[in-house]
Image: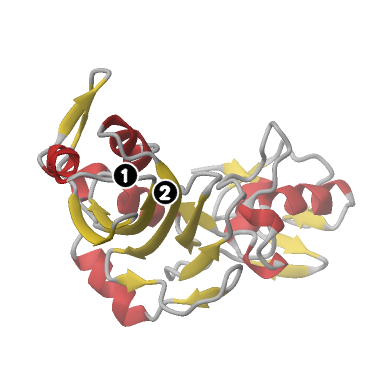
Amino acid sequence: MKVRLAKYIADCGVTSRRDAEKLISQGAVSVNGNVVDTPVFFVSDDDKVFVHNRQIQPDTAIQLYMFHKPINTMTTVRDPENRKTIYDVIDDKYKHLKYIGRLDFKTSGLLLLTNNGDFARKMSLPQNHIPRTYIATVVKHKKSGLDIARHGVTIDGVKYRPMQIDVIDDKTLRIMVTEGKKNEIRIVLKHIGSPVIALHRISYGPIHLGKLKVGEISEIDKKTIDLMLKNL
């Protein structure tokens, strides 16, 4: 299967796709001995790709990292409104990584990054029921409202699965979901009369944010990755 040259370079872990396009336009990339100066170029695994005269090849081993996403950052490569993205925060050597699922602009906490697109897709599929745990700060809450969310609810024709909700105090909840619909927690809590003030993810499957500082990245060990693959 052929892929765009910039994607191939990014998948090899050299740099981000955007920066790979810059390398191509600068004449720093050659394929099978010929310099390529246009990003509209496709290659396969049979082609020999060189960057700055060094041959590159995709890394087939799955790499997985946890990232402590700051608030007010978009989980995307480019934002049409020019808001700060996670790729403006992370170090250049990680910019080729793909995010697993998303955290919205105002949500902080654990975001997983990987070099493997297929693994990222499987980790995000609702049918795999991978638990994600959040700490939500709300305006207020009542048991009757929380019980609605605990049993599942349909809002504007969209069904939301039951949430596991533990009360920490009068304005703080620990919430576990397994579906990952867009803005799921914010929508459901607003519906039950408990609008979210702040939302912070602390775990995704077996991976816990722990004491990782805001903006930092930590690599996940192979044993944990193998466990996750086994459960997909």
Q: Position of residue 138 (x, y in %)?
A: 37, 48
Answer left or right for 82 relative to 106. Answer: right
Tags 2 and 1 in contact by the CB under 8 Å rule? yes
Answer left or right for 82 relative to 7. Answer: right
Residue hosting label 2 = 101
The kind of secondary structure element at disc 2 is: loop
User: Image height check: is 4 above or below 115?
Assistant: above
Q: Amino acid at mark 2?
A: Gly
Answer left or right for 136 relative to 58. Answer: left
- Residue at 80% across / 39% down in the picture? 38
Tell me, for residue 19, which label it has, or none.
Answer: none
Q: Nearer the viewer, residue 176 or 12?
A: 176
The kind of secondary structure element at disc 1 is: loop
Residue furthest out toward the top: 157
Q: Position of residue 179 (x, y in %)?
A: 25, 44
Identify the image quadrant of the C terminus.
bottom left
Tell me, for residue 180, which label it has, or none.
Answer: 1
| Sooner in the amino-acid sequence: mark 2 or mark 1 | 2
- Residue at 20% across / 54% down in the picture? 165
Q: Position of residue 157 (x, y in %)?
A: 23, 18
Residue 63 shows in the view: yes
- Disc 2 residue crowd, few under 14, some 14–19, many 20+, Cα 10 Å: some
- Residue at 50% across / 44% down in the picture? 104
Q: Nearer the viewer, residue 112 or 169?
A: 169
Q: Nearer the viewer, mark 2 or mark 1?
A: 1
